[in-house]
Image (spheres, rainbow, N blue to C red):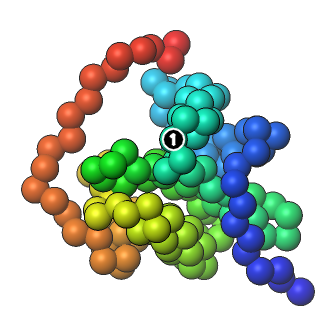
C-alpha cells in the first residue's frame, strides 16, 4: 500500500540524498556547488524566520525538495526538484502549495521564481499552476566562486 506524501523540514543528514535527487532531476550546474548551496540556505534559515527548506517523502524516500524564502518584498523558490520517477504525480504541485501557504502566512504579496528559458517542461508545469511570465530580464553577478 502506498503511503501518503509527508512534508518535513530538511535535516542536514538528508544532504547526500537531496543532492542525489537534484542530480537525477537535472538541477545541478557545474558552477553551483550543491553542498555550499545547502550550507548557505541553512545559514540563512538560522537568521530569517521566513526561510524554508522542505523535503517531501513517500515510503521513507525523499521524492521532492524546495528552498523558499521571503525577504519582505517578494518570495522566492529555488531547487524545486521532483524525482523523475514521480513527476506528473502531483507532488510538485503539492510542494508549491505548501510554499505558497507559508509565504501567504508570512504576508508575502508575490512569489517570483526563475526558470531557464529552454526548460519547456518546467515552464509548462508553472503555466498549469497559473504562474504568469513577467516581462523582466534576470540579471546575475557571481560574487563568490563555488570552485
Q: Is residue 75 left or right of residue 137?
A: right
Q: Quadrant of the N terminus?
A: bottom right
Name the residue at the right extreme. Answer: 1
Name the residue at the bottom extreme. Answer: 1
Please give the count of numbered marks on the rendered protein.
1
Q: Is residue 59 left or right of residue 109?
A: right
Q: Is residue 60 left or right of residue 79?
A: right
The location of residue 51, given as percent across then percent down, is 52, 48
Check disc 1 and report the residue beneath it: 48
The location of residue 55, given as percent across then percent down, is 67, 57
Residue in the foreground of this view, choosing between 16 and 76: 76
Indicate the quadrant where residue 11 lies.
top right
Q: Residue at x 26, y 29 (%)?
A: 140
Residue in the foreground of this view, choosing between 51 and 136: 51
Q: Residue at x 10, y 56 (%)?
A: 135
| Helix, strand or loop status at disc 1 | loop
Label 1 packing within 10 angstroms: few (<14), some (14-19), many (20+): few
The location of residue 96, given as percent across then percent down, is 49, 68
Residue in the foreground of this view, choosing between 108 and 137: 108
Residue 110 in the image: above or below residue 69: below
Q: Is residue 42 among what the camera can see?
A: yes
Indicate the quadrant where residue 12 lies.
top right
Q: Residue at x 70, y 49 (%)?
A: 10
Q: Is residue 24 among what the camera can see?
A: no
Residue 34 in the image: above or below residue 143: below
The location of residue 94, given as percent across then percent down, is 56, 75
Q: Residue at x 81, y 61 (%)?
A: 61
Residue 102 in the image: above or below residue 16: below
Amino acid at each position: 500500500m502506498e503511503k501518503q506524501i509527508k512534508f518535513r523540514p530538511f535535516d542536514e543528514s538528508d544532504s547526500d540524498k537531496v543532492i542525489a535527487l537534484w542530480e537525477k532531476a537535472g538541477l545541478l550546474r557545474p558552477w553551483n556547488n550543491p553542498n555550499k548551496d545547502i550550507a548557505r540556505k541553512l545559514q540563512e534559515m538560522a537568521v530569517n524566520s521566513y526561510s524554508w527548506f522542505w523535503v517531501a517523502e513517500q515510503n521513507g524516500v525523499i521524492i521532492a525538495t524546495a528552498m523558499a524564502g521571503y525577504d519582505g518584498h517578494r518570495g522566492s523558490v529555488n531547487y524545486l526538484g521532483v524525482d523523475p520517477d514521480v513527476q506528473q504525480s502531483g507532488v510538485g504541485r503539492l510542494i508549491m502549495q505548501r510554499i505558497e501557504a507559508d509565504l501567504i502566512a508570512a504576508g508575502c504579496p508575490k512569489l517570483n521564481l526563475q526558470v531557464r528559458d529552454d526548460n519547456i517542461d518546467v515552464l509548462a508545469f508553472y503555466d498549469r499552476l497559473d504562474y504568469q511570465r513577467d516581462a523582466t530580464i534576470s540579471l546575475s553577478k557571481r560574487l563568490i566562486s563555488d570552485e
